[in-house]
Amino acid sequence: MREIVSLSVTAAAGGLLYREHSARTKAERLSAATMETLLNAIDANDEETGHHVRRVASYALILGDAAGLDQHTLRSIERVALFHDIGKLHGALTDIFHENAKLTPEERRAVRTHPQRGAEVLHPLSAFYPDLASGVAAHHERWDGKGYPRGLKGKRIPLPARIVTIADSFDAITHRRRYSAARSLGEAVAAIREGRGTQFDASLVDLFLSQPVISKIGDAMRRAHGPRRTGDKRRRGERESVPDVTFRWRTRSHESPARDR
Ligand SMILES: [Fe+2]
């Protein structure tokens, strides 16, 4: 009799565990779908920004990996990187961002609203991803406190934002934009070094510029830029190669798609 009771308790516990696992897997899938939908919305509005954020995510993850950060933090960095510019998708700002001409002071002021706008767009997800909106809001803060919007200084700037800002600057320098030609890896290295301890967290810059890390970053950059040399004009109809972002949030939910339905 005691054995039967113990067997049924074990079976009940097993059932409970299975249901918990199933519920968690569904929640992870919903989260993955939400993130991918947001990324699709960026692509649909502004493909150039969609490509930029994927490259930034790939560089940020190389730096995060090199810093020995855990998976939870890496996922958070990836989300901040992928959605850091979502605040640019605002009618008035999209045009300004793609202007060829120099910005007027008024336009510059408008551009500086995009981190906060992004945080507002992402605010409803704060209950699930508490670091997302704050990381996006802080991606133009500077280590010396001279950034925007809040003038946060040093380690008061969330870690994902400190990592993403280096990756973002690197991509802004090395990737051709409508208003500026791409510059070389060497020029980007010099610019990032120049911002060490002023614009950027010094220890993260040291890691970013260390030989193994910058060599991985350089490889990722060349893959993203495809066979063209830096500065070349893209031929008509030629598609830009986009980093296949890791989508770390998706990995587990796609392991066994049929089982937990
Ligand atoms: Fe930005």
Image: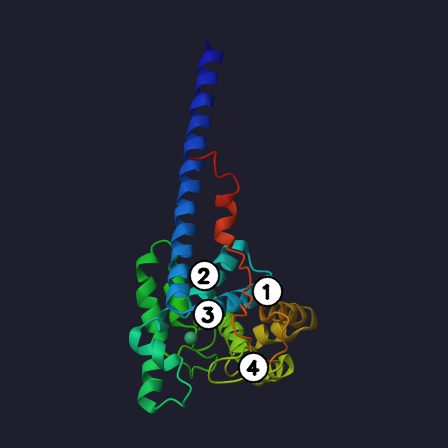
**Closer to the camera in the image, 203 or 192:** 192
Instruction: Report which residue position mark 4 lands on.
Output: 182
Instruction: Give how far apart the Cα atoms at labels 3 and 4 are.
Output: 24 Å
* Figure quadrant of the N terminus: top left
CB of mark 1 within 8 Å of CB of mark 3?
A: no
Instruction: Give how far apart the Cα atoms at labels 2 and 1 are.
Output: 14 Å
Instruction: Report which residue position mark 1 lands on.
Output: 62
Say what amino acid the circle numbered 2 marks: Arg
Instruction: Report which residue position mark 3 lands on.
Output: 161
**Closer to the camera in the image, 179 or 239:** 239
Is residue 98 rendered to the left or right of residue 255? left
Asked which secondary structure carries label 2, the reply is: helix
What is the number of the mark on residue 79?
2
Q: In this view, does 168 lie above or below 78?
A: below
Say what amino acid the circle numbered 4 marks: Ala
Instruction: Give how far apart the Cα atoms at labels 2 and 3 are.
Output: 11 Å
Is residue 146 rendered to the left or right of residue 227? left
Q: Which residue is drawn at 53% across and 54% down?
A: 71
Say what amino acid the circle numbered 1 marks: Ile
**Is the residue indicated by label 2 positioned so its CB lies within 8 Å of ligand 1?**
no
